[in-house]
Image: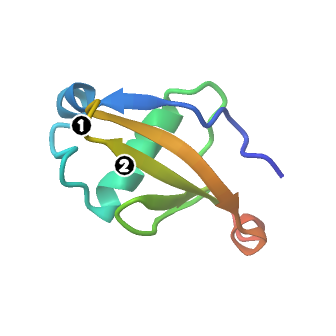
């Protein structure tokens, strides 16, 4: 079962500071990772948040799929990687 929208997207540190001023892109908390992922997904047509949860300082669950937020300090850019999915989490969606 594929994720229901494109899972590409990225933000520069400057964009994070401008659009999500409470987040320090150089020192992300688990909640920050989820907030950035949801922010990027909400910009994509057709995205519906059916459930999400914090996982750790790199990954978070959205709609039963686990995503990693790559933090590339050299280019000062954050980008999304889809890691996998959970049948149990997908079946529990609203």
Q: Is residue 94 visible?
A: no
Farthest front residue in view: 74
Say if 7 sits above or below 34 in the image.
above
- Count of numbered marks: 2
The label on residue 35 is 2
In primary-sequence order, the first of circles 2 and 1 is 1
SS at badge 1: loop
Marks 2 and 1 close (CB-CB < 8 Å): yes
Which element carries disc 2, helix, strand or loop?
helix
Residue 69, image x and y in percent? Answer: 43, 48
Distance, label 2 to label 1, CA atoms, is 9 Å
Q: Is residue 42 left or right of residue 66?
A: left
Q: Which residue is mark 1?
A: 20
Crowd class of label 1 (few under 14; some 14 to 19; many from 20; radius 10 Å): some
Q: Residue furthest bottom?
A: 88
Location of residue 68 in the rendering, given as x and y in whole percent from the top left corner: 49, 53
């Amino acid at each position: 079962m594929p994720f229901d929208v494109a899972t590409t997207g990225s933000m520069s540190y400057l964009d994070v500071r401008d659009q999500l001023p409470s987040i320090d892109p150089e020192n992300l908390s688990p909640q920050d990772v989820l907030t950035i992922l949801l922010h990027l997904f909400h910009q994509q047509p057709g995205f519906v948040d059916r459930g999400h949860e914090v996982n750790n300082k790199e990954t978070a669950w959205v709609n039963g799929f686990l995503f990693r937020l790559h933090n590339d300090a050299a280019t000062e850019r954050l980008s999304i990687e889809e890691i996998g999915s959970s049948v149990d989490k997908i079946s529990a969606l609203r």
